[in-house]
């Protein structure tokens, strides 16, 4: 049995090597490992996988075996040769043909988010996102967007749709929305464009991008446009009351720091934004998934 000191060092090592795990996942998706194995009529050996992907046999074998240890692939040995196939996890979320495919988000994380996180320490120092250092964006355009091109924007939109296909039903079941016959899902340039009249406005993963000041401006605009008796449904990942959990939400909040000008918030912090904008009867519901729901009435 290991000592407390050894357990602590093991945990430290796990944290330090965490980026390697994500890179294995990103690389396997980029190379098309999971799609290839899904399309193959039977499990494939590393040499066959390498030949079809155009990759080195040595590197491919190392990647495949690591994917096995991460439960992304499974392997069986026949006549001394390892044969690989997808696990249920990868078949469900990492194969393009799957209705629950999440590869668009993984590609975005690999090509954009990961690079920003390399500048986390500086973001903590000055409180600004790191687009200039990561992508050569002019310093006067610190918050241009969370994508650098039209292609990346479309990929990010597809990624959000993919995530919503998994998480959306939990969020929409948090409250009875039948009271709101006309619903507006707010998007576009919502700080300038007029908002259409509606009974309920949905702000899905919007407020976490912005400072409190900008959030207050947007919520005030929504309140003015909202029909009497209507409301706003805020969809975000809620922090615990003390801000020290859940871990995934804390990581999301740091991600807002390095990529945008916003943050994730506690229920009390959302109440502090909604009440001054004129909204009442604020209710927060945790869904047990990635995203939670806040309903407030006009």
Image (cartoon, rainbow, N blue to C red):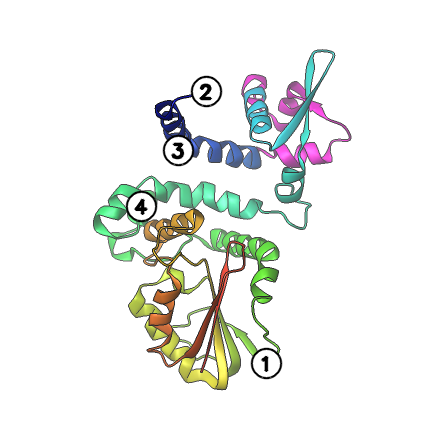
Residue 57 falls within the magenta-colored stretch: yes
Question: What kind of secondary structure does the magenta stretch mostly adopt?
Answer: helix
Q: How far is mark 1 from mark 3, CA to CA? A: 46 Å
Q: In this picture, is 62 found above or below 117? A: above
Mark 3 or mark 4: which comes first in sequence? 3
Q: How far is mark 4 from mark 1, CA to CA? A: 48 Å
Measuring 42% from the left and 21% from the top, which residue is drawn there? Answer: 2
Residue that numbered label 2 is attached to: 1
For the residue carrying disc 2, how many other residues have a C-alpha within 10 Å: few (<14), some (14-19), or many (20+)?
few
Query: Residue 242 versus residue 49: which sits nearer the camera?
Result: 242
Residue that numbered label 1 is attached to: 179
Q: Is residue 196 visible?
A: no
Q: How far is mark 2 from mark 4, CA to CA? A: 50 Å
Query: Residue 93 versus residue 175: which sits nearer the camera?
Result: 175
Q: Secondary structure at mark 1?
A: loop
Q: Secondary structure at mark 4?
A: loop
Residue that numbered label 3 is attached to: 15
Q: Secondary structure at mark 3?
A: helix
Q: Is residue 109 visible?
A: yes
Q: For the residues labelled 2 and 4, say whether their Cβ atoms are less than 8 Å apart.
A: no
List x then y, in percent, for residue 239: 40, 56
Residue that numbered label 4 is attached to: 136
Residue 28 falls within the magenta-colored stretch: no
Mark 4 or mark 1: which comes first in sequence? 4
Mark 1 or mark 3: which comes first in sequence? 3
Start-end of magenta stretch: 31-60
Measuring 66% from the left and 34% from the top, which residue is drawn there? Answer: 87
What label does residue 31 carry, if any? none
Q: Is residue 166 left or right of residue 147?
A: right
Q: How far is mark 3 from mark 4, CA to CA? A: 29 Å
Q: Seen from this angle, which residue lies furthest right?
A: 41
């Amino acid at each position: 049995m290991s000592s407390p000191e050894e357990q602590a060092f093991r945990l430290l090592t796990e944290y330090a090597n965490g980026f390697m795990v994500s890179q294995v996942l990103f690389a396997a998706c980029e190379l098309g490992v999971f799609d290839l194995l899904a399309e193959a009529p039977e499990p494939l050996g590393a040499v066959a996988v390498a030949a079809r992907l155009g990759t080195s046999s040595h590197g491919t074998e190392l990647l495949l075996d690591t994917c096995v240890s991460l439960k992304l692939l499974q392997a069986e040995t026949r006549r001394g040769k390892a044969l690989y196939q997808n696990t249920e996890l990868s078949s469900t979320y990492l194969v393009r043909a799957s209705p629950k495919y999440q590869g668009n988000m993984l590609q975005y994380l690999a090509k954009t988010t990961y690079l920003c996180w390399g500048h986390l320490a500086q973001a903590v120092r000055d409180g600004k996102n790191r687009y200039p250092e990561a992508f050569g964006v002019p310093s006067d355009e610190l918050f241009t967007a969370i994508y650098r091109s039209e292609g990346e924007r479309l990929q990010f939109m597809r990624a959000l749709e993919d995530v919503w296909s998994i998480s959306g039903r939990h969020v929409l079941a948090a409250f009875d929305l039948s009271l709101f016959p006309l619903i507006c899902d707010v998007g576009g340039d919502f700080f300038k464009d007029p908002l259409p009249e509606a009974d309920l406005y949905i702000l899905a993963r919007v407020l976490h991008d912005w400072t409190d000041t900008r959030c207050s401006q947007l919520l005030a605009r929504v309140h003015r446009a909202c029909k009497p008796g209507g409301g706003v449904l805020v969809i975000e990942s809620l922090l615990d009351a003390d801000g020290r959990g859940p871990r995934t939400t804390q990581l999301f909040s740091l991600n807002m720091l390095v990529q945008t000008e916003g943050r994730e918030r506690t229920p009390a912090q959302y109440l502090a934004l909604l009440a001054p904008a004129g909204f009442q009867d604020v209710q927060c519901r945790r869904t047990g998934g990635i995203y939670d729901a806040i309903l407030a009435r006009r």
